């Protein structure tokens, strides 16, 4: 107790300061640099696979906001042909219910999180805008087969596996060591 009066608290504080002084930065230069997001992210987009879609409209019925509009006609072999498949992503809350309910895995959440638009109308996506492309890729949300193909999430901080009971030990991962390959 007596010893503490002579600055052990200051020494402890300075030790923490020095430890952080020589640590590599854990920030990234967004948007030039981006971290790998969770493989099951519900990104602000949807990806639609027309070859798997039967036009059953289960996804549209599952949407609590009524965001999905589907128009079909009966084609050859008594199957539906999808004339219109439109999603108003401006009203979408990205709950993923439409994706979970699709019996044919014809709909997936996207992995992107940068879909801001200047005009509300641009957020209504038609069939062509929902197709898989280089910039529109599916997330592993409710799609385990897709999930295993995606890179693992890059984490800046994670809990120590063997943290002591009651303790809150964290490890800081330096991006210089981990960047580019995830954790
Ligand atoms: S995306 Fe799935 S649930 Fe929606 S209409 Fe197509 S097959 Fe049916
Ligand atoms: S993610 Fe949710 S809110 Fe968005 S279209 Fe699908 S069901 Fe509707």
Image (cartoon, rainbow, N blue to C red):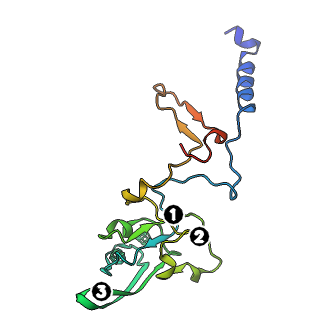
Vertical order, 114 against 21 (above or below): below
Q: Secondary structure at mark 1?
A: loop
**Callout 2: few (<14), some (14-19), or many (20+) C-alpha neighbours within 10 Å?**
few
**Vertical relation: 74 (above or below) 99:** below
Q: Earlier in the sequence, mark 3 or mark 1?
A: 1
- Could you say which quadrant of the image residue 58 lies in? bottom left
Residue at position x 37%, y 72% from top?
Answer: 106
Residue wearing tag 2: 115
Q: Residue most toward the left?
A: 78
Disc 3 versus disc 1: distance between alpha carbons?
29 Å
Labels 1 and 2: the sequence-earlier one? 1
What number is the disc on residue 80?
A: 3
- Number of numbered discs: 3
Q: Whole-Å distance between the Cαs marked 1 and 2?
A: 9 Å
Question: Of tags 3 and 1, which is closer to the observer?
Answer: 3
> Where is residue 169 shown, x and y percent of the image?
55, 30
Location of residue 163 in the rendering, given as x and y in whole percent from the top left corner: 49, 28
Q: Residues within 10 Å of mark 3 (few under 14, many from 20)?
A: some
Image coordinates for residue 155, horizontal then vertical, percent: 56, 44
Residue under label 1: 43
Q: Quadrant of the N terminus?
A: top right
Q: Are marks 1 and 2 in contact (CB under 8 Å)?
A: yes
Q: Nearer the viewer, residue 82 or 69?
A: 82
Question: Left or right: where does residue 133 sit relative to residue 9?
Answer: left
């Amino acid at each position: 107790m007596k010893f503490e009066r002579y600055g052990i608290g200051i020494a402890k504080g300075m030790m923490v300061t020095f430890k952080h002084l020589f640590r590599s930065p854990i920030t990234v230069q967004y948007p030039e640099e981006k971290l790998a997001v969770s493989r099951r992210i519900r990104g602000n987009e949807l990806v639609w696979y027309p070859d798997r879609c039967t036009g059953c409209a289960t996804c549209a019925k599952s949407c609590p906001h009524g965001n999905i509009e589907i128009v079909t006609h009966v084609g050859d072999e008594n199957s539906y042909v999808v004339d219109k498949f439109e999603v108003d992503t401006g009203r979408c809350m990205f709950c993923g219910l439409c994706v979970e309910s699709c019996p044919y895995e014809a709909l997936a959440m996207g992995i992107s999180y940068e879909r801001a638009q200047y005009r509300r109308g641009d957020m209504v996506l038609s069939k062509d805008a929902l197709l898989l492309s280089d910039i529109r890729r599916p997330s592993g949300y409710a799609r385990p087969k897709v999930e295993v193909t995606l890179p693992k999430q890059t984490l800046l901080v994670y809990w120590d596996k063997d943290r002591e009971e009651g303790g809150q030990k964290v490890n800081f991962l330096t991006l210089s060591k981990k960047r580019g390959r995830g954790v």
